[in-house]
């Protein structure tokens, strides 16, 4: 079943210097039980796409799309109240900065218990407080927090960034959402805890059929836990498809560069050899190149690249490039 269906999502910001198109015609879809990775450098628009899905962008941002539906319902046409109801019931998000997302004036335990829907608690009304607290403790245990009593009686500012991240994950999975959006969920965690939480998300996907959109700038982490992959560069979707197929044969020069820059994907790389990197850096939103935004850094750039490439399809592999690596290899 198709849960999320977005076509040509554009997110613009009106500034004193003119209109800035931070996200340019990005298409994204998610099916029930699917895990999709969304990768790209910092500033590529990954978090903006996620926030547009859950409707938390402020009014300064202008959101348009040819299609933006959740389970067949057009999310751009429903009222704000109805949209909040749908998102609150079916979609949860783990934010990148957990300490800023939690209420600093309320105890962690109170916030976690408030996130648990009453419909998931069995028993009589006078048993609800006890059942809610028991459920909150179980959620903390699931994300690897054993000292639940101390954590639940603490305020967010009294806890480390890593613990706050685990609390955010516990709050996100409390309502058993159909879609979980994880925006850099392991940024503040040590490597062993990162692996534990990735396995936790994978278990929810496999056991409960929860769809997961995993957002990260670390390609190797996303590739290990996702079935499909979408690659963003500077607000443009450059490639999308099966994760294994993209890693084996990327069509877009930017995806190719990302893969070559990861030692894990280069088994023949000699010790102390320099890693591959594209020249230059990602442009600022105020000075975006025309056409293909990778153009100034792309090793295959030609004069045709001043025009924005269309999203092409080869079987289930999508790419936006005038001169894809596939055609170059065949010639």
Image (cartoon, helix red, strand yellow):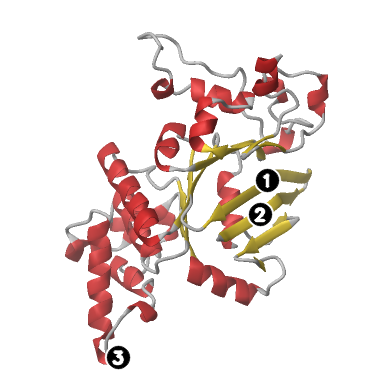
Q: Is residue 299 visible?
A: no
Q: Residue at x 39, y 23 (%)?
A: 264
Q: Is residue 45 above or below residue 51?
A: above
Q: Residue at x 56, y 72 (%)?
A: 86
Of mark 1 and mark 2, the one earlier in the sequence is: 2
> Are the residues at dot 2 and dot 3 in contact (C-beta closer than 8 Å)?
no
Q: CA distance from mark 2 to mark 3?
A: 41 Å
Quarter of the image with the C terminus in it:
top right
Q: Residues within 10 Å of mark 1 (few under 14, many from 20)?
A: many
Q: Nearer the viewer, mark 2 or mark 3?
A: 2
Q: Residue furthest front?
A: 315
Q: How many marks?
A: 3
Q: Is residue 151 above or below residue 292?
A: below
Disc sitting over residue 151 in the figure: none
Q: Is residue 132 visible?
A: yes
Q: Is residue 231 above or below residue 274?
A: below
Q: Position of residue 159 (x, y in %)?
A: 28, 54
Position of 20 with respect to 186 (left or right) is: right
Image-quadrant location for residue 318: top right
Q: Position of residue 324 (x, y in %)?
A: 69, 24
Q: Secondary structure at mark 2?
A: strand
Instruction: Read off the residue under disc 3.
Output: 125
Q: CA distance from mark 1 to mark 2?
A: 8 Å
Q: Nearer the viewer, residue 114 or 203?
A: 203
Instruction: Read off the residue under disc 1.
Output: 26
Q: Residue at x 64, y 38 (%)?
A: 315
Disc sitting over residue 6 in the figure: 2
Q: Residue at x 73, y 33 (%)?
A: 287
Q: Residues within 10 Å of mark 2 (few under 14, many from 20)?
A: some
């Amino acid at each position: 079943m198709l849960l999320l269906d977005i076509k040509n999502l554009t997110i613009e910001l009106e500034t004193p210097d003119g209109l800035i198109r931070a996200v340019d015609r990005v298409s994204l879809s998610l099916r029930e039980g699917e895990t999709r990775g969304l990768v790209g450098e910092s500033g590529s628009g990954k978090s903006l796409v996620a926030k547009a899905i859950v409707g938390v962008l402020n009014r300064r941002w202008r959101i348009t799309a040819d299609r933006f539906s959740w389970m067949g319902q057009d999310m751009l046409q429903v009222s704000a109240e109805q949209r909040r109801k749908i998102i609150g019931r079916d979609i949860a998000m783990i934010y990148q900065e957990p300490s800023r997302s939690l209420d600093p004036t309320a105890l962690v335990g109170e916030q976690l218990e408030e996130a648990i829907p009453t419909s998931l608690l069995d028993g009589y009304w006078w048993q609800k407080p006890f059942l809610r607290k028991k459920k909150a403790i179980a959620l903390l245990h699931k994300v690897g927090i054993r000292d639940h009593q101390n954590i639940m009686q603490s305020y967010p500012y009294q806890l480390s960034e890593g613990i706050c991240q685990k609390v955010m994950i516990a709050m996100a999975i409390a309502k058993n959402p159909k879609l979980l959006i994880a925006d850099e969920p392991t940024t503040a965690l040590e490597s062993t805890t990162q692996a534990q939480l990735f396995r936790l998300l994978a278990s929810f996907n496999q056991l409960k059929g929860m769809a997961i959109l995993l957002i990260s700038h670390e390609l190797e982490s996303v590739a290990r836990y996702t079935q499909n992959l979408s690659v963003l560069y500077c607000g443009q979707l450059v490639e999308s498809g099966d994760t294994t197929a993209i890693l084996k044969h990327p069509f877009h020069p930017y995806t190719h560069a990302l893969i070559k820059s990861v030692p894990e994907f280069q088994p023949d790389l000699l010790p102390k050899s320099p890693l591959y990197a594209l020249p230059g850096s990602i442009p600022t939103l105020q000075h975006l190149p025309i056409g293909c935004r990778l153009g100034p850094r792309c090793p295959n750039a030609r004069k045709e690249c001043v025009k924005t490439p269309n999203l092409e399809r080869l079987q289930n592999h999508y790419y936006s490039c005038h001169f894809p690596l596939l055609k170059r290899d065949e010639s």
